[in-house]
Image: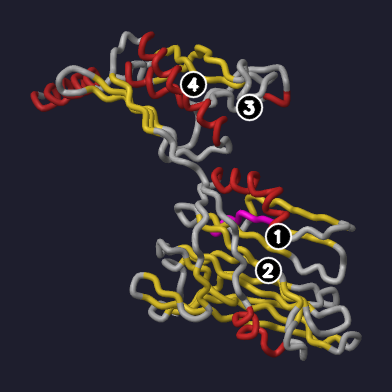
Amino acid sequence: MKFKLILLTFLLFSTTLFATHDGYIETYIPIANPQSELLEKEGIQLRKVLFFTYASTEEASINSVTWSYKANTPHKRYKNREANLAHIKGLKVNFLYHNNGGCKVTIDSRKVISPYRGKTLNKILNYVEKATRLNMKASGLHCKVKVIKVPQQTTKFSPKALNLAFANLKAFNHYKSGFKQAPFADDRFYPLGYSSDNKKFAYIIEHDTDPADIVHIETFIQDLVTDKIVWKNSYRVENYRKRPNFATFWKVRHHKIEKYLNTYGIKPSTITLQTGRHSYRHDSFNLSSKMATSYSRDWASNFLNTSTIYINSKKRGRKTINEKFYKHGSSHTLARKPMAFLASSNKSRRVAILVGTVTRGWEGPPHNLTYEIVGANLAVGFKK
């Protein structure tokens, strides 16, 4: 009986001590004016909105400036659209009490990942600071405010194409033409870099379109976990009197590409082409593949039915990282093989694999050689 009384007293005390304070708080947030551009005078407005929270305290009144807010609207195109411009991935607005009774608010934008850049992003962050000071005033707080500015986003850079001549011949020597200067009609591959967690990889492919008077360049951001393309941009010019080159393309598209690199947290960096072994955490890895083909009389060639890509661990065995099936009679694919690891400098467990595919040239050699990316996790999934 005495034990039950003690337990009941403890539960009542705990409930009172750790009770939440459910309630509404009013918070100023920066909101975009749908009828103006953000950089215009009326492009951003500070509005007071209501949040219902389990912690209606001074801390919540400061932190809530970055909370998601979706305004009610009869317009279908604005329905469920994020209205709070301060709801930015990586932006931190923190409230902290000092032991001496004072307080500090820190607005930290060092890890911001946003589709907005340059002057637009700076203007939004300035309004975040204005909103925070208004929220402090409304809560009766007199804290010191420390603003840690967002660093300069993607610096100017010029993509460099990988020299794949050796890798092409190492993987597909059997399919090369007799022309020394053109063993393949191959695309050009430009790696851009990995995201900070190595789960996204960005690259550019400049397609070989000779002899047609066409320029076709595609930019990709790929999820290395699912291998899905999360963003793609195509640049295509036909019948151009003065045929543009890669420099022309980059001058036209680099701002847009850099914007999306920033959105996905990808920092352009040097990528190392490793055609042999790749090391990770005291283990060594290499690549292999298996193909099944069938003979076509009409083309006097063997074409692919299936293609399987493997990664092999020296310590833990092998695993399949990709498999493709080809419809009999409709594919002119001669071979598909993994060519190299595209290694990043941070030695991550996730890595992009460059895979090449050779398809029969319409009139025979030189055959067409195209490239794709397959993601691989070096830490799990291997079987002996």
The amino acid marked with disc number 1 is Phe
**Residue 55: percent from left, percent from top:** 35, 20
> Which quadrant of the structure image shows residue 10?
top left
Q: Which residue is mark 4?
A: 127
Contact (Cβ within 8 Å) of mark 2 with mark 1:
yes
Cα gap from disc 2 to disc 4, whole angstroms: 44 Å
Q: Which residues are magenta?
A: 218-224
- What residue is drawn where x is 55% and y is 35%? 118
How many residues crowd mark 2 within 10 Å: few (<14), some (14–19), many (20+)? Answer: some
Q: Earlier in the sequence, mark 2 or mark 4?
A: 4
Relative vertical location of residue 140 with respect to residue 52 in this rendering, above or below: above
> Which quadrant of the structure image shows residue 335?
bottom right
Is residue 221 part of the magenta span, yes or no? yes
Viewed as shown, does residue 274 lie left or right of 106? right
Q: Which element carries disc 4, helix, strand or loop?
A: helix
Cα gap from disc 2 to disc 1, whole angstroms: 10 Å
How many residues crowd mark 3 within 10 Å: few (<14), some (14–19), many (20+)? Answer: few
Cα gap from disc 3 to disc 1, whole angstroms: 39 Å
Q: Which element carries disc 1, helix, strand or loop?
A: helix
In front: mark 2 or mark 1?
1
In front: mark 4 or mark 1?
1
The amino acid marked with disc number 3 is Asn
Cα gap from disc 3 to disc 2, whole angstroms: 41 Å
Q: Which label number is shown at residue 246?
A: 1
**Residue 231: percent from left, percent from top:** 65, 50
In front: mark 3 or mark 2?
2
Q: Which residue is mark 2?
A: 188
Q: Earlier in the sequence, mark 4 or mark 3?
A: 3
Is residue 349 part of the magenta span, yes or no? no
The amino acid marked with disc number 2 is Arg
How many residues crowd mark 4 within 10 Å: few (<14), some (14–19), many (20+)? Answer: many
Q: Earlier in the sequence, mark 2 or mark 1?
A: 2
